[in-house]
Image (spheres, rainbow, N blue to C red):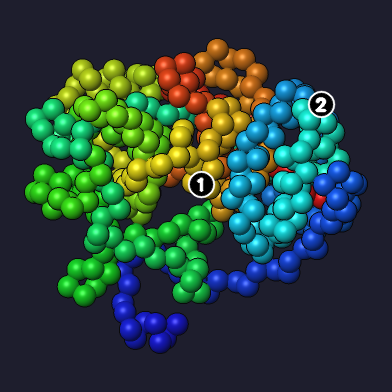
Amino acid sequence: MMGFRNMMFIRLGMVVSVLLLATALPGCISLSTASGPLSAPSPAPLAGQPGQLFVPASVSDYQGWSKAQAVGLSRALQESCKVYAKRTGQVSDNPLFGTYEQWHPLCTRLSQLEDHALQSFFESHFAVYQVAPEEKGLFTGYFTPLLHGSRVRSQRYSTPLLKVPEDLVQLNPKKFGLKNSNDQRLNKMLAAKLNDGWMVPYDNRAGINERVWRGEYKNDVLLWVDDRVDRFFLQIQGSGTVRLDTGEDVQVGFAGRNGHDYFAIGRYMKQKGLLEEVSMQSIRQWLDKNPDRLDEVLHTNPDFIFFAESEKLGPVGAQGSRLIPEHSAAVNRSVIPLGTPLWVNTTLTRNNTPFARAMVAQDVGSAIRGNVRVDVFFGAGAEAGDKAGYQNADGKLYVMVPR
């Protein structure tokens, strides 16, 4: 620590302390053949004690577990398996989630199974844990929006989608033996820039927009779009499609952020009496009617997302896997590692009906904090946007880990 401090002073406004060493690795799973029996020890006994985050459960606790849900889970999980196949070692600092080597034979077997065998496969070879049963949780939704843009700035296309700026420096506290002051955000990356030799926090949303207006991001523009509100909601969703004036459709996805905490503008609007009922639809309607207050409202969220073009078809999550509507979700990855199978018991807010789904944790988001916290990917288009815009409910969350 002292050597690092002698090399550089860091002014990032956070309390840091020495990071504790990780615990031991769990044993590996064994698979005799792709069609033969599987056998494996249960995961390390890290749950079940009072106050523990993960409490043992079973598929009998699910509401609506079925062949159809097992098929949907398999479809999403095979996307994550493409990522897992390239990795080795621990999946997470928490040994409950095992190693990538445990996943390799499971993924191979999964790709060979017929639909009718999937339900029993998951029941036989995965252990179930409920996440923080005493917490109500929060289940929201997101979707893939469609924006209109151009590769050339014009009077119509004047709002930039920025790449990760050249002057942004990212820092992982864990690599310096440090940890964040907030235990719920242990894996938060810090974003900074150099100012007269000092490393200082990167600009917030208002500061970035001001620099855009001054022309300071000429080399950092990915595309130009025609609506600031559309860009804002794209940043909330994390990925989407930009239809260019040439007729080309460009997929864009999350590439980085400015390091500031996310703040929901709907909360501000409700506190100020601007809205009684908050949803994506009501927020957009109000902003369309009050363009003179756009900066006031949007700048209450200091978080700013940067994008990159994606060559993959369809939306891609933070794990690098293709997202499957209603079977992919964003989670707090300091609690649940990406690629983990989930079961969600909640309510579809739009029509107040039960919503129970098997999903895979494949994405993250600035607003995804807490333990029982899921952002459901509803897909693309108006129907998906309608579901996502209203979604806001409590519920129960389960994880599935290799036995």
In the visual, does 279 lie left or right of 47? Answer: left
Figure label count: 2
Identified at 23% across, 20% down, the residue is 288
Identified at 58% across, 15% down, the residue is 352
In the visual, does 46 lie left or right of 124? Answer: left
In the visual, does 244 lie left or right of 116? Answer: left
- Find residue 116 and name its label: 2
Q: In the rendered structure, which amino acid carries the disc numbered 2? A: His
At which x and y percent is residue 365? 46, 43
Identified at 75% across, 55% down, the residue is 102
Residue 403 visible to the viewer: yes
Q: Quadrant of residue 240?
A: top left
Q: Is residue 393 above or below residue 302?
A: above
For this rendering, which residue is in front, 131 or 157? 157
For this rendering, which residue is in front, 93 or 99? 99
At which x and y percent is residue 65? 76, 26
